[in-house]
Image: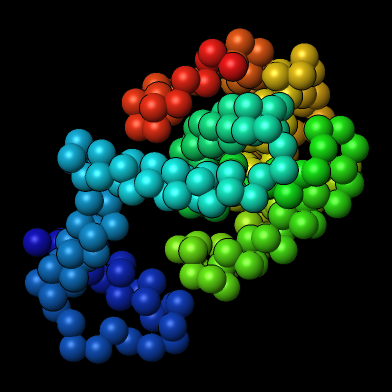
Amino acid sequence: MLSKKFLEKFKALYRKKTGKDLPGIDALDLDTQMTTLVKAIYKPTTKEEDEFVQKIRLNLFCTIAEEVNRQFKLDIHSLHGIHHWVHVREMGFYLAQTIGADFQVVDLFSTLHDSQRENEDYDPNHGFRAAEYVQTLFTKGLLPIDKKQLGQLKFACAYHSERNTQSNDITIQTCWDADRLDLGRVGVVPHPNRLCTDAARSKEVLKWADGRAGFRVVPGFVKDEWGIELGSQ
Ligand SMILES: [Fe+2]
């Protein structure tokens, strides 16, 4: 049961924020309501629930990766192919967990942002074409995201390789940083000034990302779930 003192404080705060008195509520009601709210928001996840969420995410990634691969003009094992998608996803998930970005947008960005590349070098419009492709997939009902996420994903794809574009959106920043953290695959260490988030700029993360990119480390699920031996390419 909440204390009387806390209840009075809460009522005063409610009055201050809304300009109204809290109607017909006693300490027990408030206690019950707040406990329910806290349980709903902060419910700890069990190992099984966590594994279930990871499985759903992996299914989405695999489904979209297959869809992208059906129309991909480059070799699946090229510099902008599946190794890169997997690494961007991995870096992106680490950053998303650290700074609170949207996992689903980051997940989809990893497979889609380079999906419309026509070559491995200078291809200035590939980001904009990727944004159009995202819209096409969304219209077909293949992307389980809402309008806000669609906007974030399209913007992140469209401008991911533009030099001077900025965004205050933490999810878009995460997408761009995850992509840049995989520059080690072409022997480039991303300059901290070209990264958007402090999490990506940390020395530990730069070193970790560079090691995985440079040595083409591939997470176990690629082989376990897909049966693809990326390391042999
Ligand atoms: Fe990329």
> Residue 180: which quarter of the image?
top right
Quadrant, the C terminus: top right
Q: Is residue 146 above or below residue 86?
A: below
Q: Is residue 42 above or below residue 48?
A: below
Residue at the image position 87 percent from the left and 43 percent from the top: 123
User: Of 132 and 229, which appears nearest the observer?
Assistant: 229
Residue at the image position 63 percent from the left and 67 percent from the top: 136
Q: Position of residue 205 (x, y in %)?
A: 60, 21
Side (left or right) of 55 relative to 79:
left
Q: Position of residue 188 (x, y in %)?
A: 79, 18
Quadrant, the N terminus: bottom left
Q: Is residue 42 above or below residue 220?
A: below
Residue at the image position 58 percent from the left and 64 percent from the top: 137
> Residue 144: which quarter of the image?
bottom left
Q: Position of residue 223 (x, y in %)?
A: 40, 24
Residue at the image position 27 percent from the left and 51 percent from the top: 42
User: Of 149 and 30, which appears nearest the observer?
Assistant: 149
User: Of 19 and 97, which appears nearest the observer?
Assistant: 97
Instruction: Evaluate whether residue 78 shows in this view.
Output: yes
The scheme the figure's colours follow is rainbow
Side (left or right) of 8 relative to 65:
left
Instruction: Evaluate whether residue 160 shows in this view.
Output: no
User: Of 129 and 154, which appears nearest the observer?
Assistant: 129
